[in-house]
Image: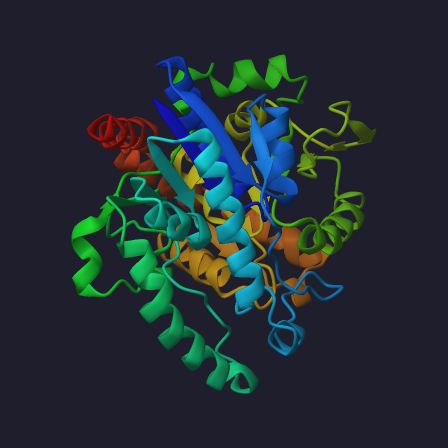
């Protein structure tokens, strides 16, 4: 069985949820090839998988990490450039003709699904956002309406023209990405909520205190874990602010910060109670060992934190509607607090941490964890992909 994974390479989240599936399939005897780009390509290569580089596609970013929709729409490469899209489709056709996959698994990339359809290769989509989301600010309102109508018509048909569309999220009413999934009724039959895709579950790790001891953490301090992911340009400004703030934190907190750079040194830089890692291979051990998670609003980090029963403080990327929607949902679930980036300061962050360390947040996080613990996205995705591939054989 040959499986071609084609995840978006922007940030680590899309590749990060494909890798556990690929490892499980490989253990079952499958041959795996990845086609991706940017940070995603480095991550896949670090994990030891065979990979080919797809043509890059991205968004214009301002210095503060927010998406620059003015530049994006003036130079529409990221979303609207026919040339870029066709270049990706052409590259994917070449890769598929060489590798001859039994199934193509796309994570949030339409170009590979188009290529697979043209070659009559079975296709599966993994997605937690059904359309491009533009901020509903007055200056972008017309663009937002056009984008929503266009993507629902065009991209929506691509997502739906698959054997199965897998949503790696909790079923309603706990769906994190519910505001990003405006799925027309005609497409509902092919959509399946499978639960988050985790490489390792909380129950398979030692207890929290044991992990804190193993990791050299101070059991008498509140442990804060800040795993920062996302595209490099969006990440840089945010990590700079956090480092400045964390360096001034009181001594009763211990902060573990991951900058999210695959292939960087795993040796940490320690500054009193702040420990900074370029990359943390065993990040799920730190996730279970911590008391609070501080992050952007990426779907992967939020779903992982819920599965591990951890309350969160979220600072969504400015102008990133998907992240704002995700963050809003987990606040509604009672397991997180939001700070907008323009208000981020030492005092705001400390107050938010003290708020979520309150027993009510802790209790709700643990209760939600128990409610969703049976959602095994890894097992479900592996089975569905295998079934589709075997039908072709």
Residue at 27% x, 55% y: name it: 160
Q: Is residue 127 above or below residue 366?
A: below
Residue at 62% x, 62% y: name it: 59
Q: Is residue 316 left or right of residue 336?
A: right
Of the pair 252 and 299, the residue shown nearer to us: 299
x and y, in percent, of residue 68 in the image: 65, 70
Q: Quadrant of residue 149?
A: bottom left
Of the pair 81 and 378, the residue shown nearer to us: 81
* Residue 227 can be seen in this image: no
x and y, in percent, of residue 363 in the image: 37, 39
**For the N terminus, which image quadrant?**
top left
Q: In this view, does 232 lie to the left or right of 81?
A: right
x and y, in percent, of residue 85 in the image: 52, 59
Residue at 18% x, 64% y: name it: 185
* Residue 46 can be seen in this image: yes
Of the pair 55 and 191, the residue shown nearer to us: 55
Residue at 37% x, 58% y: name it: 332
Image colouring: rainbow
């Amino acid at each position: 069985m040959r499986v071609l994974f084609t995840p978006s390479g922007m940030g680590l989240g899309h590749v990060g949820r494909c890798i556990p599936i690929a490892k499980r399939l490989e253990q079952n005897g499958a041959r795996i090839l990845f086609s991706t780009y940017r940070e995603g390509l480095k991550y896949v290569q670090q994990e030891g998988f065979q990979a080919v580089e797809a043509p890059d596609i991205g968004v214009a970013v301002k210095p503060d990490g927010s998406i620059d929709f003015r530049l994006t729409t003036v130079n529409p490469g990221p979303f609207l450039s026919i040339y870029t899209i066709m270049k990706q489709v052409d590259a994917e056709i070449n890769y598929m003709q060489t590798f001859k996959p039994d199934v193509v698994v796309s994570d949030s990339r339409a170009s590979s699904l188009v290529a697979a359809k043209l070659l009559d290769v079975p296709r599966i989509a993994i997605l937690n956002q059904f359309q491009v989301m533009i901020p509903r600010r007055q200056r972008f309102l017309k663009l937002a309406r056009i984008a929503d109508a266009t993507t629902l018509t065009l991209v929506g048909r691509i997502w739906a023209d698959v054997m199965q569309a897998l949503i790696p999220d909790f079923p309603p009413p706990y769906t994190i990405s519910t505001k990003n999934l405006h799925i027309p009724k005609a497409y509902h039959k092919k959509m399946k909520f499978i639960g988050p895709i985790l490489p390792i579950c909380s129950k398979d790790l030692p207890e929290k205190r044991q992990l804190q001891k193993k990791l050299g953490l101070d059991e008498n301090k509140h442990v804060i874990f800040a795993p920062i992911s996302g595209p490099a340009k969006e990440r840089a400004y945010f990590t700079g602010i956090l480092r400045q703030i964390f360096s001034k934190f009181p001594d009763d907190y211990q902060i573990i910060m991951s900058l999210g750079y695959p292939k960087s040194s795993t040796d940490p830089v320690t500054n009193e109670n702040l420990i900074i890692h370029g990359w943390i291979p065993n990040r799920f051990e730190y996730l279970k060992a911590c008391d609070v998670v501080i992050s952007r609003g990426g779907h992967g980090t939020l779903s992982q934190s819920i599965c591990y029963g951890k309350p969160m403080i979220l600072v969504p990327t400015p102008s990133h509607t998907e992240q704002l929607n995700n963050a809003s949902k987990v606040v509604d679930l009672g397991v997180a607090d939001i700070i907008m980036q323009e208000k981020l300061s030492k005092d705001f962050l400390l107050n938010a941490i003290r708020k979520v360390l309150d027993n009510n947040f802790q209790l709700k996080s643990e209760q939600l964890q128990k409610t969703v613990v049976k959602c095994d996205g890894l097992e479900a995705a592996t089975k569905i992909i295998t079934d589709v591939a075997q039908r072709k054989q």
